[in-house]
Structures are given as structure tokens and as C-alpha cells.
Amino acid sequence: VVRAVRAFLMPWCALHLVALYLYQFQYAQEWIPNTPYDNEDAADDSNTTVLLAKLFGLTPIILTNCSRPSELQMWPEVPYNKILNPFCLLFLFWVLASDCRMWLTTPGFLWKEHSVY
């Protein structure tokens, strides 16, 4: 069971990190809109794309403007948990990758003798 959970979580974590990274581009934020943080009550949740963005945890952190690409702006009033989310996912991916690497490089007889799974 633990091996199946590990095998499921690693691709999910990697895809979620890639999706969060790609969502920071202006075109992705226009294609799948999400409400700004200071205007949560004005959101129209009946819109399917807004619902998808909220269900998949796509949160705009970087406010992009293609007319001024040299400026890096952040959305005003971004909650700290939205900023920590990608770092926590990266840490989870690192832990899973290290665990899988140890599992694949350790001889099988050691796992059978000392396994708690």
C-alpha cells in the first residue's frame, strides 16, 4: 500500500509544481482566471474555469504584465500560505524522490528483514 501511495504521490506532486509554475504566466492567468485575493467575495463561482482553478489550487502569486516584462510584481495581500505552497510541494517531492532512490538502491533482503510496511 505504501509503495502505491509513493508511486501516486511523486507524479502528482511534480505535475502540481509544473502547473503552479505555468500558472504564474499572464496567458495562463487569462485563460484560467482566478479571483484576486482582495476580492474573494466578488467571484462568480458558477464559472467553470474559476472553479477549476480553485479545485486544483492554482493561485496567482506573480502579477505579470507582458507590456513591462522587466518588472516583477506580486499580487497585493497574498496570504503567506499561498507563497509557501510551492516550497512545501518541492520539499515533499524531494522527500519522495530520496525515499524512492533509497528503496531502489537498497538490496531487497535488507527491506525484508527491517521493513515496517
Image: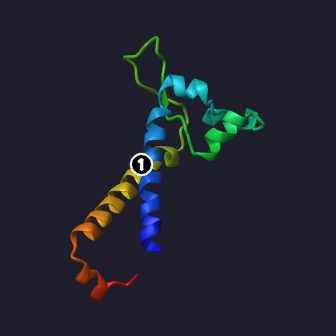
Residue 70's spot in the image, x, y percent? 36, 17
Q: Residues within 10 Å of mark 1 (few under 14, many from 20)?
A: some
Q: Nearer the viewer, residue 82 or 18?
A: 18
Horizontal side of 70 relative to 39 (left or right) equals left
The quadrant the C terminus occupies is: bottom left
Residue 12's spot in the image, x, y percent? 47, 52
Residue 31's spot in the image, x, y percent? 60, 26
Furthest-bottom residue in this view? 113
Furthest-top residue in this view? 67
Horizontal side of 41 relative to 20 (left or right) equals right
Q: Nearer the viewer, residue 5 or 90?
A: 5
Is 7 situated above or below 88? below
Residue 26's spot in the image, x, y percent? 51, 23
| Residue drawn where x is 30% and y is 85% of the image | 112
Is 49 situated above or below 82? above
| Residue drawn where x is 29% and y is 70% of the image | 103
Residue annotated with mark 1: 14
Q: Nearer the viewer, residue 3 or 83?
A: 3
Horizontal side of 31 relative to 102 (left or right) equals right
Furthest-front residue in this view? 108
What amino acid is labelled 1 in the image? Ala
What element does badge 1 sit on? helix
| Residue drawn where x is 48% and y is 46% of the image | 16
Scheme by which the image is coloured: rainbow
Is 80 situated above or below 50? below
Snapshot quadrant of residue 42: top right
